[in-house]
Amino acid sequence: MKYTNTLKRFFIIVITCSAVCSVSCKKILDVGKPTKTITNEETYRTDESALSAMAGVYASMMYDSRLNFGNGATTLYAGLSADEFTTRDVTGSLLSFQRNDLYVDLAEPGLCFWVPAYKQIFYLNTIIEQAAASTSGTFTTPVRNQLTGESKFLRAFCYFYLTNFFGDVPLVLTTDFKVNALLPRKAQAEVYDQIEKDLKEAQTLLSSDYALANTDKTHANKYAATALLARVYLYRQKWKEAEEQASLLIDGGNFSLVDALDHVFDKTSQEAILQFATTTNYSDYRIPERRHFVPAIRWVDDIVNYGLESVYLDHPDDYTNFAELFYPSETLTKQMLSAFEKDDQRKAFWTSYIESPNVSPWYGAITYYIKKYHEVNTVGVEGEQEYTVMRLAEQYLIRAEARAHLGKLAAAATDLNVIRARAGLPSKSASNMADMLLAIEHERQVELFGEFGHRWFDLKRTNRAQSVLGAISIKSPFQSYQLLYPIPRPELLANPNLRQNPGYN
């Protein structure tokens, strides 16, 4: 059809233009562009240069040469390890994560998690040491405290993900290469002790505003430290402490749930506690998740909304020609889709779908994908959304779970139902702790899906992974050793004091 060919040329032109356009990166801070001289003591002579060093840490975490634990890898790989995503990469390493069939020589555990996390930890240790050592009169105490607090928060953030992926890990707290190169793994309890210590110190050092980032929420403050500390207490089963920390954020009046679900992840969102700054340098890649979760041509937005479905559904050959552009690399599993209750507005706003012709190999199947970051990213144009790291909804669910364990079932239900009401769902109650905890687990699944690996970590920490994931054919039989990722072989070869996780040869 002539119309089809015209449409095809139109999409090719648009995609090609998007690929070749480029602009300079936006500034992350008004105090100066990110600096790569984080380890240079001269950097810590003035407030401006020291703040630029911290901006460099955020930039390094967000815009690495590949996905890392802080910019999309956690969402992707943990989502595959759990029951959130299925991959179209049927021969590559992504399928290993979906099968939970990892092996020592697999590149991703090292390149996406271990190496970038320890790289950031080294940078953060440098800032902590250099900030403490500087005697410059133009490096002021408020900025020294801010940088130290941010560094301790981010170090805790790095270790949180390291220990949840790998279990026991080396605890690197200095910049001494000779010592660090031979450190053995520390027990997870000791790692968590250090995380708690760093977060408590960050709370005392950091301010309670977002002035440093011109009211954007792209730099950690006291609230971010409190949010992560509440999560850590929950993971450590310190129920009273988790309830207390979450309450500081819920009842403090500084945050509120966003009623409009399609604006939860906006940079102006009152729900956001911490976001990482994006850049306008790339179109599809400004929000990291878009690399894997959002197709080049969105069926609903680009086809259905223009009444063009029949152009493809009635002409399977044309559909086949465009299939690679219609489908993202990873889509939602049937387990994830079945978790949404009828009328759950999160499915309506936070997912989208692709239809298909009713012929082989499509058979009219409808495929869903995540759409929390919904806006089209245009090169050089500031977007409305920012990369959200922590938000208030999680704190309601943390407090609900903590209260359930404390026997406060009515209060737990109240917190749970705040989240359900926002999603357009009726209230739930439970007469016993076990039923309430299952209700909270379910709500965490449908509220936090596709966000920094919550589902994978939840199934592990509640000892539910083997029963839930073992029931999925592609993952069966699921064995306990698969709860941890393997220590990368290059790290084992470089450090004779490291030991591999059980189950990996």
Image: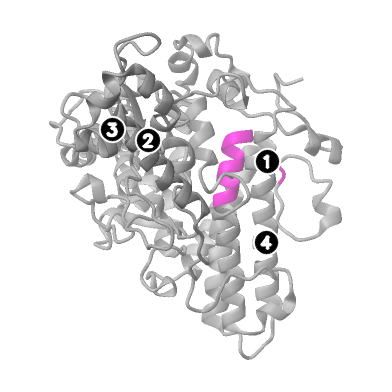
- Tag 4 secondary structure: helix
The part of the image, by quadrant, that contains residue 295 is: top left
Give the magenta range: 157-170
Q: In the image, residue 181 lies at what x, y percent?
A: 83, 49
Prevalent SS, magenta region: helix
Q: Residues within 10 Å of mark 4 (few under 14, many from 20)?
A: many
Q: Amino acid at mark 3?
A: Tyr
Residue 486 as seen in the image, left or right of residue 225: right
Check the image and report above or below for 406 versus 342: below
Q: In the image, residue 209 lies at what x, y percent?
A: 37, 70
Q: Amino acid at mark 2?
A: Lys
Q: Residues within 10 Å of mark 2 (few under 14, many from 20)?
A: some
Q: Mark 1 against mark 2, which lies toward the viewer? A: 2
Task: Report the disc number at residue 3.
Answer: 3
Q: In the image, residue 27 lies at what x, y percent?
A: 49, 71
Task: Report the disc number at residue 123.
Answer: 4
Q: In the image as oriented, which residue stretches furthest toward the front? A: 2
Does the magenta-highlighted stretch encompass residue 78? Answer: no
The part of the image, by quadrant, that contains residue 52 is: bottom right
Q: Amino acid at mark 1?
A: Leu
Residue at mark 2:
8
Gap in angstroms between the C-alphas marked 1 and 2: 37 Å
